[in-house]
Amino acid sequence: MKYMMTYDMMESMRNTNQWLGATARAFASYPAVALWPNPGMEMLKAWGEVTERSFSRMVAKPDWGISTFTCEDGKDHLVSINTVVSRPFGDLIHFAVPGRKARNRRVLLVAPMSGHYATLLRKTVKSLLVDCEVYITDWHNARDIPVSAGKFDVEDYTLYLVDFMKALGSDIHVIAVCQPVPLTLAATAYLAAEDPKAQPASLTLIGGPVDPEANHTEVTDFGRSVTMGQLEQTMIQRVGFKYAGVGRLVYPGLLQLASFISMNGETHTKAFQDQIMRIAKGEDGEHDRHNTFYDEYLAVMDMPAEFYLSTVERIFKGRDIARNDFWVDGKKVDFGKITTVAVKIVEGEEDDISAPGQCLAALDLLTSLPDDKKAAHLEPGAGHYGIFAGRSWRNNIRPLVLDFIDANSGDPTRKLRRAKHKDLPPDAGLSNVAL
């Protein structure tokens, strides 16, 4: 599978489907077709529109869509997305609101590198902007990174996080979502040994696989059922000639997307069938619920092959983190070195990606951290997406996270500021009204 031809073939199939959708939509929209009214033409047009949009989104990086913010003065202020640290495989960016008084809470969101762009956390960013200065890791699509940039595996990822934390200072509060949870914990432990003063003030770890064996899911079962050789031969390809990363070994985003969809195939099939019918009846909208979700869901990025393979081998199969036997740059990372950083675990009761218990295992590794620095929350009825961007996040988890940040901040006045707003409605995090 590790040939540019197979990558180009996959891209050609995607491009062909996009072209077929565009052709069907254009043909069914031809004015002369209206002379012979036929519901079949409306269905063809609807199918073409859905197909063209879906396949075109697979190679487009979504925009953040956060352009303005309403501040205390009642005016809309522009949001400026600034790069704080620029690296070949990912940047550290800041959502700045010029004209707004700087927030005392400073939060670093660690976004997953698991097939989707960091924009998957758009709603999380919006909800936190109300109360915080928000920074986020913006990982790059591996297909666009020249081979000359070198490799990028779990150790490089961890060192990137170390550098990002150092750049932001020790008063930063880190929130890691899903895949980066164990590596964020490792980066903090690395700092605890190498540069204790650069450790963050707190860690909030949301639905991540610290110990995949703590509670099995389809993801962990897949990881246990295949060998590394099988993964390398069936999942890894070389970027084709169309992109700047030509020749780079990657785990293609299109393959990852196929895996995502196969996990809930019937649900996705029905969603697209329903959308086609809505378009045929004229009941759709440019930003309706279907388009809003799938424009993001279908936008996928390639991962560096060494990152994907080392994640499977060291996090899932070898359980290096769970066994406290993780090494970075020739140095063993000892989680017992973390003694001052407050750690909060958030899990969803119905999470089918990182099931309850997988993330909670982090607390057992923190043998030198006092109990009053540890916290955990299991959200009833919440799935994976809901614990960081859905209703459960807005109504229950976000307020708890902000309280946790305040309780572990050096500025005692923050608790008072939080108390002033304790009667806000649960969905206040999604509004653009500054506190």
Image: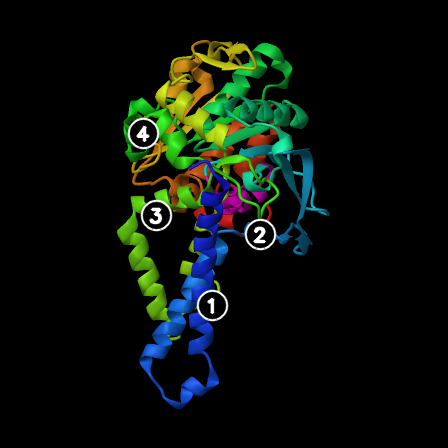
Foreground tag (1 vs 2): 1
Q: Residues within 10 Å of mark 1 (few under 14, many from 20)?
A: some
| SS for dot 1 | helix
Q: Nearer the viewer, mark 4 or mark 2?
A: 4
Mark 3 vs mark 1: which is more N-terminal? 1
Q: Going from the N terminus, do you reach mark 1 or mark 4 first? A: 1
Above or below, 435 relative to 329: below
Neighbor class of circle 2 (other Cα within 10 Å; few <14, some 14-19, many 20+) is few
Q: Which residue is mark 4?
A: 220
Q: Which residue is mark 1?
A: 22
Q: Element at badge 4? A: helix
* Above or below, comparing residue 36 to residue 99 in the picture: below
Kind of element beneath mark 3: helix
Q: Which residue is mark 3?
A: 261
**CA distance separating discs 3 and 1:** 23 Å
233 in relation to 362, above or below = below
**Mark 4 Cα-neighbour bin, 10 Å: few <14, some 14–19, many ≥20:** many
Identify the residue under disc 2. 63
The span picked out in magenta is 115-136
Q: Amino acid at mark 4?
A: Thr
Query: Per the image, is 340 magenta?
Result: no
Which amino acid type is marked by label 1? Ala
Q: Earlier in the sequence, mark 4 or mark 2?
A: 2
- Whether tag 1 and tag 2 are in contact, CB under 8 A, the answer is no
Q: Residue at x 61, y 13 (%)?
A: 196
Q: Earlier in the sequence, mark 4 or mark 3?
A: 4
> Percent from the top left, x then y, of residue 41?
36, 78
Amino acid at the residue labelled 3: Ile
Which disc is residue 426 wearing? none
